[in-house]
Image (cartoon, grey):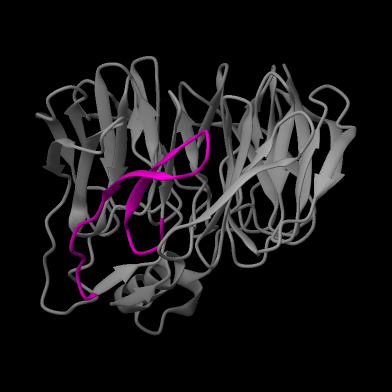
Amino acid sequence: MKLIRPFLLVLVAALSACGSDKASIEPAKLMDFKPSAQVTTRWKQSLGDAGFNVLTPVVTREGVFAASAKSLARFERESGKQVWRIVPDFTVSGGVGAGDGLVLVGGDKGDVAAYDDVSGALRWKTKVFSEILSAPKIADGVVVVRTGNGRIAGLDAADGKRLWLYERSTPTLIVRNHAGVMIRNGMVYAGFAAGKVAAIGLTKGVVIWESAVSQPKGNTELERISDITSLPAVDDTQVCAVAFQGRVACFDAVQGGTLWTKDISSSQGLALTGSQLYLTNADSHVLALDRASGSSLWKNDQLSLRRATLAYPLDDYLLVGDYEGYVHVLNKEDGAFVARYKTDGSPILTSPVLLGEGALIQTSDGNLYSIALNK
């Protein structure tokens, strides 16, 4: 099984389409606009370098938890004051997950560790099959861990012992990605190589339904890649997922029946809110679709090839990070820019995370920003 990174595929596709026209494949330059909102820094903390890993902070009632490749820390939500910091005995490559009094991270050699969210004390540690590239999730006493080879394991939250295992065959060439799982209403939702999405029972790991988002097509292995490399978007009624070099599709959350499909390629994922679905496509264009039908509502193409993150909904706005460490604030209704915020200049690889009336931004250089958006 061979692995390839998503941004390399984007570059290959752009070069194939544009030939020797180098100017057309350069990232878009940022355009000036008149701000109608302001982003301010509430606090900032340094975590340390994430390496090649995509690490996402998590927020609970107890605090903010965030990791670098070498450490895991807890901060106060309002002030950002560090409460504790620990150094696991492995390189952190997947995290952070939290719930039921635990904080969870995974390692590059398959280690999974659970720490007490109050004290930072190690509760348990176990090992799964291969590197962990996404945050472990926890619900109803089950920790769900996804490994880099596509396997998903359910672990007992009390001691880390394995309860169940889900695995499937994979194509010869797949995209190395940091997609994990979503848990809702006793179901584990995940996308896979070759464009499949599945709903798995949380307690026993039994497949409830499996549906196709996209079908591989093309003459070469590279052309036939149609992997789901991002988290599905899930609520009580719908599950939506998008495949790289494929399509976006929405399904009935209970039975898995297809509601609609649309030809869009993305490695960043989707966000569902209200009557709309938001996504960032393979060219870093931000799009809004009608969630009931998939019809296009608007598109902002001014972040073209800037490796834009998933658009994260925050009140009337969307927050999008890019490869130069900018956070772009867009109007939900029409996609117009309303504000821009500069971090440390290193890439923002994961979408913002909600914190109170603002958001958390983690950069690849390991700086954690708590920001507020003022109208």
Q: Is residue 354 above or below residue 263?
A: above
- Residue 156 highlighted magenta (yes or no): yes
Question: Could you tell me if residue 68 is visible in this image?
Answer: yes
**Where are the magenta residues, as a range?**
147-172
Give the residue drawn at x 70%, y 34%. Answer: 116
Q: Residue at x 36, y 74 (%)?
A: 3
- Percent coordinates x, y for residue 236 in the rendering: 30, 16
Q: Is 156 displayed left or right of 205 in the figure? A: right
Q: Quadrant of the N terminus?
A: bottom left
Q: Residue at x 10, y 77 (%)?
A: 219
In the figure, 43 relative to 86: above or below? above
Q: Is 73 contained in the magenta span?
A: no
Q: Quadrant of the C terminus?
A: top right
**Residue 20 at x, y percent in the picture:** 40, 85
Displayed quadrant of residue 298:
top left
Q: Position of residue 81 (x, y in %)?
A: 90, 32
Judged by its main secondary structure, the magenta piece is loop
91 in relation to 155, above or below: below
Q: Is residue 113 in view from this perspective?
A: no
Depth order, front residue of 324/98: 98
